[in-house]
Image (cartoon, grey):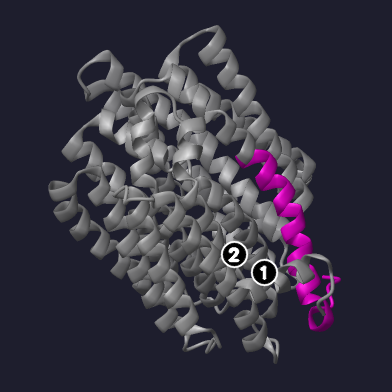
Amino acid sequence: MGVNMKKGKYQYLFGNMALFTVSNFVSKILVMLLVPFYTNVLTTSEYGIADVMQATLLLLVPLLSLNMGEAALRFGLEEGENHANILKTGFKYVGLGILGVSAVCCFLAFVLPGRELKSYAALFAVLFFCDSVYEFMLLFCQGAEKVKVMITGSVSCTLLVILSNLFFLLVLKIGLYGYLAAQMISFLGAAMLMFVLMGGFSLLKEGRRDPALEKEMTHYGKSMLLYSTSSWVNNAIDRYFVLAMLGTAVNGLYGVAYKIPAILTVFQRIFAQAWQMSAAKNYREEDSVSYFSNMYIMYNAVMVTGCSFLILTVRIIAKLMFAKEFFAAWSLVPPLLISVIFGALTGFLGSICLAYKDAKSMGWATGIGACVNIVLNAVLISCFGAFGAAIATMISYFTMYAASFFKVRKHVKLQVHYRKDYLAYLLLIVQMSVMVFRAPLDLIWAGLLFMFILTIYGKEAAELVKGFMGKRN
């Protein structure tokens, strides 16, 4: 594929990271700038309903398409794979998922009481169609190494969602319905753009039914079902518990609390997208242990220091992003930030397992985390409200990370700094407690803890800068 993996794997990774940085910063930062707008024009209940719909999509899109997007990514990166056949096979299963959801939503639109619930069922069917096509095209383009097309799609999706939201919420003032319509327009518009830029019509015309490839892709996708479903439980089940136990208004606060961790998720996503491609290409290399270990050390350092900085500045950021009663959500943010670290590291380890086509191990690890998440949400929400849900999420993500680290050892024994890392995690817990419980001189103590963590990972920060400057081989 034109990449010198022996000498160029760092450049390949950092080069893709540079491209994904453009995409994610433009997309995610612009979307985050809309949060004050959303919290001004939507009620907490409306935001809570939209948040549950989006969380449900995270489960159903990969589940009902048999993870065809992930299969298209993984097989697309294989030497010699036919992208036309992959696209044709992928669309077949995405289409089947769309038909299934449409049938169920049509049934619900007839049997559900009340006009509002009927409209939500119909809107969800359209939203599922738009989102499933968009997510598949993103992963297909990534697997075909058409990163620039993928970035174009991602950025265009962002621009469409901004323009549509401004029109529907500011001009037409139709609240939740306008918010959902903006999502549909942006997903479908971006998907169509990527399809055209990829020469989708020609690829579908060239594509042939390939039973062997279809069998491999569906086997791979099915083997990932436990992994993707358990990942969804860890990502979203807390919203359902909060909704059921505390109501839509509190769920709206909880949903908006995730917007600050989304800042850290931007950096996580940049690396994860590039790393998933790099891991699939390098897992057979002789020096893969050294390469994977170096990347893990650097990745962990960036995520921990970024998390610490956001915990330090959480109230300032919340003041800028959250309007009116939404500001109360700031106290839920620190444990959610820490959970992002362990979710990111789990994703890193998962990419190694998936490079070896070992989805079973990651399904086992994320399944354990999901079980812990469900039990802790039921217990802690009843005791501590929405903050209990955030703590449950943090603990379950750590459990998932620890199990993943254990499982990945059968493929690669990473050489990492255990003592230093666990000291840093402990300091994050202390920093979180200082800020959330408003200890005396909390900002000063939190600032000192941030400086200590920054000192711990000073060497890794320098290595990362060198990598981006192209000084590594």
* Dominant secondary structure of the residues highlighted in magenta in the image: helix
Left or right: residue 345 compared with residue 369:
right
Element type where label 1 sits in the image: helix
Q: Is 412 located above or below residue 189 in the figure?
A: below
Query: x, y percentage for residue 361?
Result: 41, 77
Name the disc covering residue 67, or none. Answer: none
Residue lying at 32% horizontally and 47% vertically, measured from the top left: 438
Q: Residues within 10 Å of mark 1 (few under 14, many from 20)?
A: some
> To which residue does mark 1 refer?
461
Residue displayed at 22% across by 45% down: 241
User: Please, what is the three-letter code of the amino acid marked with disc 2?
Assistant: Val
Relative to 167, is 465 on the left or the right? right
- Give, as a three-letter code, the residue at label 1: Ala
Q: How many marks?
A: 2
Q: Residue furthest top?
A: 172
- Is the residue 294 above or below the residue 469 in the image? below
Q: Is residue 360 visible?
A: no
Give the structural element (helix, strand or loop) at label 2.
helix
Magenta extent: 1-28
State the quadrant of the C terminus. Answer: bottom right
Q: Position of residue 21 (x, y in %)?
A: 71, 52
Tell me, for residue 302, which label it has, or none: 2
Q: How far across and down, in percent of the image, does residue 199 sit?
A: 79, 44
First in sequence, mark 1 or 2: give its number: 2
Tell me the distance, in whole angstroms, between the alpha carbons under discs 1 and 2: 7 Å
x, y percentage for residue 279? 64, 74
Residues 78 and 5: in front is 5
Q: Where is residue 392, by image quadrant?
A: bottom left
Q: Residue furthest bottom?
A: 286
Question: CB atoms at circles 1 and 2 under 8 Å apart?
Answer: yes
